[in-house]
Image (cartoon, rainbow, N blue to C red):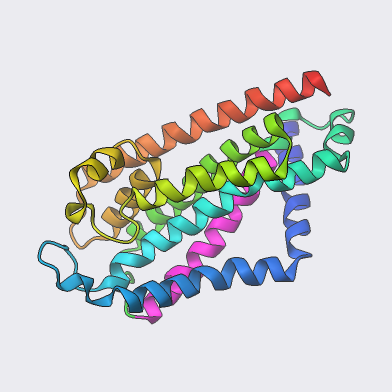
Amino acid sequence: MRRALRHTWYMTRRHLMGLFRQPVWIAITLVQPIIWILLYGALFKKIVDIPGFGSDNYIDFLTPGIVLMTALFSGGWTGMGLIEDMKAGVTDRFLVTPVSRGALIAGRLLMLGIIAVIQSAILLSIGMLLGASYRENPAGLLLLVVCSVLLGASFGALSTAMAVVVRKEETVIAAVNFIILPLTFLSGVFITLSLAPGWIRTAARFNPVNWAVEAGRGALSSSPDWGVVLARLGLLAAFALVCGWLATRAFRAYQRSA
């Protein structure tokens, strides 16, 4: 167990060091969601005046959704890095070393979790500077960050599974866009689902992105319904476990074929 944890941390450090050598990537991943908050916050500011919206401050409403959407997109593109490693022969070289096989996947997912925590802290700080009122709810903030980590890790695992199966960047890009964009718009990231058509509300009940949104935003509300929040968190955690299992199975199949 200690050996596996040590190897996982080694792989996590390797991935983080690779990211930190790409200042343009860091700038884009931090600036883009800030632009989303500023852009959508200004564009849809008056939407709170619609009867039944359920909030009188759109930045309050939007910021948790942007935090989760950022983690979702970060996770979705994880497979691209794995494909680069496979094409360069890095993955195959690791397979002939004593490194724990589970660490090859867990290291990427832990890296995603660390990035999600950093992004969440920055975006929540920006949201509060723009008028969101979360300072008196540390438990809600912590739970939102947990949702962000789980969501990013879930789709990071799915992206990893796709990468080791298809092994082509173009296919992974197409698949990620095909999956992530509809899931985002079939959730309550931008508007409350009480204003959405019935079929969207039905689809959202089975949407892991919406589970994260309902849990994170619900925990930050002035009077959280903890039964609903914890139920959605449980569904999200179960989804993360399933995605991790799929990634492990796919990687084992790749290992046998390598």
Residue 170 relative to residue 246: left or right: right
232 in the magenta segment: no
Residue 179 in sight from this viewpoint: yes
Residue 52, image x, y percentages? 11, 61
Residue 96, image x, y percentages? 89, 28
Q: For this rendering, which residue is in front, 110 or 4? A: 110
For image coordinates 50% across by 68% down, the residue present is: 33
Majority secondary structure of the magenta segment?
helix
Residue 190, image x, y percentages? 33, 61
108 in the magenta segment: yes
For image coordinates 37% across by 81% down, the residue present is: 130
Residue 67, image x, y percentages? 44, 61
Q: Quadrant of residue 42?
A: bottom left
Q: Is residue 63 above or below residue 149?
A: below
Write the start and end of the magenta stretch as one range. 106-130
Residue 27 relative to residue 258: left or right: left
Q: For this rendering, which residue is in front, 63 or 103? A: 63
Query: Looking at this rendering, what residue extends furthest in the left direction?
Result: 51
What quarter of the picture does the C terminus occupy? top right
Q: For this rendering, which residue is in front, 189 or 200? A: 200
For image coordinates 34% across by 66% down, the residue present is: 62
For image coordinates 60% across by 55% down, the residue present is: 114
Residue 255 relative to residue 191: left or right: right
